[in-house]
Amino acid sequence: MTLIIYKERMKKFIYLSTCDTCKRIMKELSLPADVLLQDIKKEPIDATQLSSLYAKTNSYEALINKRARKFKEWGLNAKTLTESEFKDLLLKDYTFLKRPVLIWDEHLFIGNAKATVEEAKEVVLKG
């Protein structure tokens, strides 16, 4: 998932502090001090925040980390899940959120794909 328009004007980086990939991307982005940092292990996303992300993606599945260990352990990779089931997973356990998530004013970047990170860098550099 790459660029999605986000209406609220804010700068927020949602990540997992124990994830080396998230830490590497945070360093690559050189985020300014005014960016709000949310470690999903310490502060999981809540229903309101998830609804806001859903409003921008129109898909809970787009927010799901299908490479999460629990996704495989729970046998979810062998099932066809509904949007409601994806939503429940996201609220149940922080590891199901695809990360990192960067909200940069009207832009929303989800995941660690190289192209997504490059697009995020361009937006962050513009300020």
Image: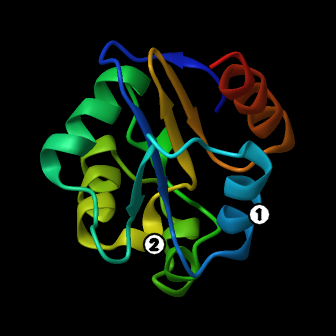
Q: Quadrant of the C terminus?
A: top right
* Residues at discs 1 and 2 in contact (Cβ within 8 Å): no
Residue at x 49%, y 63% (from the top left corner): 79
Q: Which of marks 1 and 2 is nearer the N terminus?
A: 1
Residue furthest front as drawn: 33
Residue furthest bottom as drawn: 73
The residue labelled by disc 1 is 24
Residue at x 54%, y 55% (from the top left corner): 98
* Dot 1 alpha-carbon crowd within 10 angstroms: few under 14, some 14 to 19, many 20 or more: few
Q: Which of 15 and 85 is in front in this view?
A: 15
Which of the 4 quarters of the picture holds residue 21?
Answer: bottom right
Q: Nearer the viewer, residue 39 or 73?
A: 39
Q: How far apart are marks 1 and 2 (CA)?
A: 18 Å
- Secondary structure of the residue carrying tag 1 is helix
The residue labelled by disc 2 is 95
Kind of residue at badge 1? Arg
Residue at x 25%, y 31% (from the top left corner): 52
